[in-house]
Image: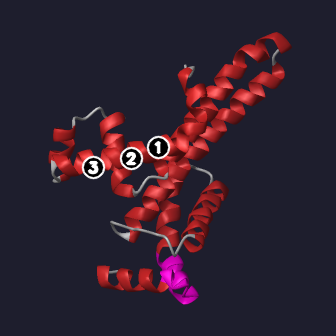
Amino acid sequence: MNKSEEFFLLQRLKEGDIHAFEVIFNYYYCNLSRYLLLLFKNELLVDHIAQDIFVYLWENRETLEIKTSLESYLYSAGRYKALNQIRNNQLQEVIRKKIGNSPGSATIETHELEDLELRNIIDEAITALPERCQQIFRLSREEEMSYHDIAIFLNISVNTVEGQMSIALKKLRSILKPYYLKMLFIG
């Protein structure tokens, strides 16, 4: 699908055109599923994640801001859904282990559970950032790149990096405000 076709379909999608959604779904679903199958070897789970992404696409069609290609947007969404699924599986594993433990050790591990839960909330807050803002934030905080290096890497100005980081931090503070106290004690 070329960029002009994609742009047209996205415009129609934003207007609520179900036919445009069907075309997008039919064009991208198989490739997205194959990509997700590389991350998970479970076809049922892959179908569930891929369907969730398309449901999200339809439900949020009016407010979608896709800065890159639709394909890259869908793959990014798939990757983040996969990461969240992995974290949820880890959380469930901690819970399963707790159930089998004695009551005394379960209270000690409660902190582990809260840490996992809080880390999941933080990652979801980061994932909720606009795509470019999220990319710059992750390069800065997770890859520990300087603003100058990010600017060179993304071929943008240092001022743009600073502006995007300012936006990211402001939005994250707003989203995470209810969790500040818990974050002070994260391990």
Where residue 74 sits in the image (x, y, percent)?
46, 64
In this view of the protein, which residue sits in the foreground, 35 or 3? 3
**Farthest residue, direction top:** 104
Q: What SS does tag 1 mark?
A: helix
User: What residue sits 55% from the left and 84% below the top?
Assistant: 16
Residue at mark 1: 172
Q: From this viewpoint, is residue 102 visible? A: no
**Farthest residue, direction right:** 103
Q: For label 2, count other residues whose C-alpha is less than 10 Å away and answer few (under 14), some (14-19) or many (20+).
A: many
Magenta part, dominant SS: helix
Question: What stretch of residues is rendered in magenta?
Answer: 13-27
Amino acid type at image mark 2: Ala
In this view of the protein, which residue sits in the foreground, 50 or 162? 162
Q: Quadrant of the N terminus?
A: bottom left
Amino acid type at image mark 1: Leu
Amino acid type at image mark 3: Gly
Q: Is residue 100 above or below residue 31?
A: above
Residue at mark 2: 168
